[in-house]
Amino acid sequence: MPTTATEITSQDNPRSDFNPSQPARIEDLKFVIDRLPFLASQQDSVLKMRRAHDRTTNLVRLWFDTQDQLRLYRPESLSFCEARPGKGDTVSLVIVDRERFDTHQARIKEQSSFQTQIEEAIRKLDALGAGWYDDLLSQVQIFGGTEYNERTRISSMTSAYIQRHRDMTPEEVLELPEVKKEREEMEQNIARSAEKLKFLRPQLQEMETLLSSCRC
């Protein structure tokens, strides 16, 4: 027989994940729908494998895993309770192991809070129209390396022209029409890449922040 018995109130079983004002279910968001085919870790192509291991797919997978854990946790609360006859045909539940019950409720609350954090990250990424993290990272790396590569090409090209025109000073070589044309093309490539990065880097940073906040 338990030494103490406490009636359960709504505060003993929090549902911090419940929010009736949510505009749409997580499962119905495009960000989630696009990743559903890749939730299985085994895929039949290299591209699909990349999608399956993309950090954004990991985020969606984590949301489903958290949902499953909460579905298991909540019914377990009853194992720390006991049914007692009430008035008439009613039955009341009372807590018979307060310490374990409170520990279990704290676990549910923590998991619910984490689930809410994941949902917020997914909604923000969906609102941004976020694509695949790996694709965005690759674009930033490609455009980010353009300036270094083009500067290296300009230096190599200039050195080669100077070697071929030993009767001219470096300044005169730089004024040759063919040299100026190639330098202008390279400078334009650098400018185009810099313009792309002005948009890509903030997107990558925001995605990185949201994913990291959910341990993805």
Image (cartoon, helix red, strand yellow):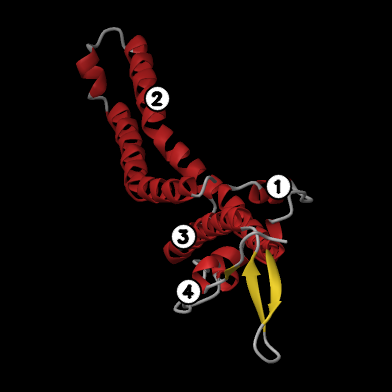
Residue at the image position 38 percent from the left and 23 percent from the top: 152
Residue with the mark numbered 4: 19
Residue with the mark numbered 1: 49
Q: Give the residue type at disc 2.
A: Arg
Residue with the mark numbered 3: 125
Q: Position of residue 4 (x, y in %)?
A: 61, 62
Residue at the image position 66 percent from the left and 60 percent from the top: 73
- Position of 122 compared to 54: left or right? left
- Give the label on residue 113, or none: none
Residue 61 placement: quadrant? bottom right
Looking at the rendered image, the disc whose residue lies closer to the viewer, 4 or 2, is 4
Asked whether 103 or 109 is in front, the reply is 103
Looking at the rendered image, the disc whose residue lies closer to the viewer, 2 or 1, is 1
Q: Is 148 placed above or below 185 here?
A: above
Residue at the image position 61 percent from the left and 67 percent from the top: 33
**Sequence order check, earlier mark of 3 and 1:** 1
Q: Position of residue 80 (x, y in %)?
A: 68, 61
- Position of 36 compared to 188: left or right? right
- Position of 3 compared to 112: left or right? right
Q: Is 70 placed above or below 179 here?
A: below
**Sequence order check, earlier mark of 3 and 4:** 4
C-alpha gap between disc 3 and disc 1: 21 Å
Pointer 3 with pointer 2, Cβ within 8 A = no
Q: Is 208 placed above or below 115 here?
A: above
